[in-house]
């Protein structure tokens, strides 16, 4: 039969698991924020292009 782990090992394992959970949560939040920012930038660019086309300027390439 295996001897139980010393108490400090349990505390270290718990602290490590909490750190991993927190890091994953922050990474997930950062990825969502980046995706939201990218989508907003695309929407803004499309709206600006539509305004240029409606005004007859054709955007930057015209």
Image: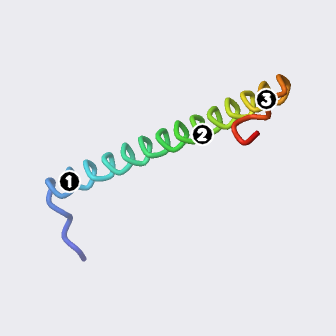
Q: Which mark is residue 38?
A: 2
Relative to residue 2, is residue 27 depicted above or below? above
Residue drawn at (18%, 58%) of the image: 9
Relative to residue 20, is residue 54 depicted above or below? above
Q: Position of residue 16 (x, y in %)?
A: 27, 52
Query: In the rendered view of the protein, which quadrant contains the N terminus?
Result: bottom left
Question: Which residue is most to the front?
Answer: 62
Horizontally, is 28 left or right of 39 in the view?
Answer: left
Mark-to-mark CA distance, 2 and 3: 25 Å
Mark-to-mark CA distance, 3 and 1: 64 Å
> Quadrant of the rendered structure where residue 38 is?
top right
Crowding near pointer 1: few (<14 within 10 Å), some, many (20+)?
A: few
Question: How is the structure coloured here?
Answer: rainbow
The mark nearer the N terminus, 3 or 1, is 1
> Quadrant of the rendered structure where residue 46 is?
top right
Judge by depth and name the residue closer to the eye, 23 or 1. Answer: 23
Horizontally, is 18 left or right of 12 in the view?
Answer: right
Nearest to viewer (mark 3 / mark 1): 3
Nearest to viewer (mark 2 / mark 3): 3
Q: Position of residue 59 (x, y in %)?
A: 74, 34
- Residue located beneath label 3 in the image: 57
The mark nearer the N terminus, 2 or 1, is 1
Residue drawn at (83%, 30%) of the image: 53
Question: Which residue is most to the bottom?
Answer: 1
Horizontally, is 21 left or right of 15 in the view?
Answer: right
Mark-to-mark CA distance, 2 and 1: 39 Å
- Per the image, label 2 sits on a secondary structure element best described as helix
Mark 3 in CB contact with mark 1 (< 8 angstroms): no
Nearest to viewer (mark 2 / mark 1): 2
- Residue located beneath label 1 in the image: 12
The mark nearer the N terminus, 2 or 3, is 2
């Amino acid at each position: 039969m295996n001897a139980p782990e010393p108490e400090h090992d349990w505390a270290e394992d718990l602290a490590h698991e909490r750190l991993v959970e927190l890091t994953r949560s922050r990474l997930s939040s950062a990825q969502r924020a980046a995706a939201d920012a990218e989508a907003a930038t695309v929407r803004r660019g499309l709206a600006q292009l539509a305004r240029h086309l409606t005004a007859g300027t054709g955007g930057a390439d015209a």
